[in-house]
Amino acid sequence: MKEKVDKLVKWLQQQIKESGVKGLVVGVSGGIDSAVVTNLIKRAAPEQSLGVILPCKSNPEDMEHAKKVIERAGISSVTVDLTETHNVLFSTIQQELEASNLLNEDQQKIADANLRARLRMSTLYTIATNHQYIVVGTDNAAEWYTGYFTKFGDGGVDLVPLVHLTKGEVREMAIYLDVPEEVINKQPSAGLWEGQTDENEMGTSYDMIDRYIRGEEIPQKDKEIIDRMHKNTAHKREMARGPEQF
């Protein structure tokens, strides 16, 4: 694990040098993936790394966990509460769509959640520009393969250091990096709405996805779910498409 951490830290330092920026910034959610990245960027750029807490109608427990991660990592931090901004923007959009008889009630829950993720992305890039930093993402191999991230939201980043690590490997790295125990053991959640958990939303478990990525046998039901997610989210892992030149 020390070798893996050292390689990731050196890789992050190389990205800083090649990009011509001064440092690194990450959104700290209170979850295990962002906790690991927080510790990695602190090691890569001890004096020029920043953790940003971005509450948006968030669970208070997630806020407390994010603060504990930042305190234990010893990283500089800032908090930007996006709740009011989200309320104003989302309600304005809804009102305009409703007035034009275009509002799709069935899609409001996911539209609300995706807007939260995209507001966080915009905030991180605004802060990154202010500091001349680049934005470091938190997606692991399981999330990347299944497309379990918001396009131009938590997927809108410059670097994805955990993209080759399964959820299990991220957990092992978190233990090595001394991430708070309550963060390591909590149920994974993107915090998109009250009571939301990753595995309930996906319909399968991270353990199953990890096993599938490693080429191991898993139940047919889980394989079908993972294959469908991978196929349906291919656009998230690609650059914007254009037609062939004519």
Image (cartoon, rainbow, N blue to C red):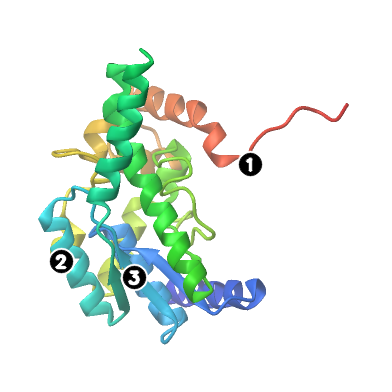
Q: State the separation of the CA atoms marked 3 and 2.
A: 19 Å
Residue 141 place in picture, x, y as percent: 44, 49
Say if 124 sits above or below 44 in the image.
above
Q: Which residue is mark 3?
A: 51
Task: Please state which of the two labelled residues, at mark 3 or mark 2, is closer to the viewer.
Answer: 3
Do the numbered discs 2 and 1 sit on residues whose CB atoms are within 8 Å? no
Tell me the residue that label 1 is attached to. 239
Tell me which residue sits at (48%, 75%) in the image.
131
Nearest to viewer (mark 2 / mark 1): 1
Query: Residue 203, can we see it?
Result: no
Three-letter code for the amino acid on which mark 3 is drawn: Gly
Q: In the rendering, at what x and y percent does residue 116 appear?
A: 32, 44
Determine which residue is flagged by label 2.
181
- Front residue of 136 and 82: 82
The amino acid at mark 2 is Glu
- Distance CA(mark 2)–CA(mark 1): 37 Å
**Which disc is residue 31 wearing?**
none
- Judging from the image, what secondary structure is the residue with disc 2 in? helix
Q: Mark 1 or mark 2, which is nearer the start of the sequence? A: 2
In the rendered image, is residue 175 in sight? yes
The picture quadrant where one finds residue 147 is top left
| N-terminal-most mark, 3 or 1 | 3
Q: Quadrant of residue 73?
A: bottom left
The front one of 209 and 80 is 80
Q: Is residue 74 left or right of residue 1?
A: left
SS assignment at label 3? strand
Q: Residue at x 81, y 28 (%)?
A: 244
Residue occupying the point 40% across, 58% down: 123
Residue farthest top in this picture: 101
Residue 220 position (above or below residue 241): above
Q: Is residue 185 above or below residue 219?
A: below
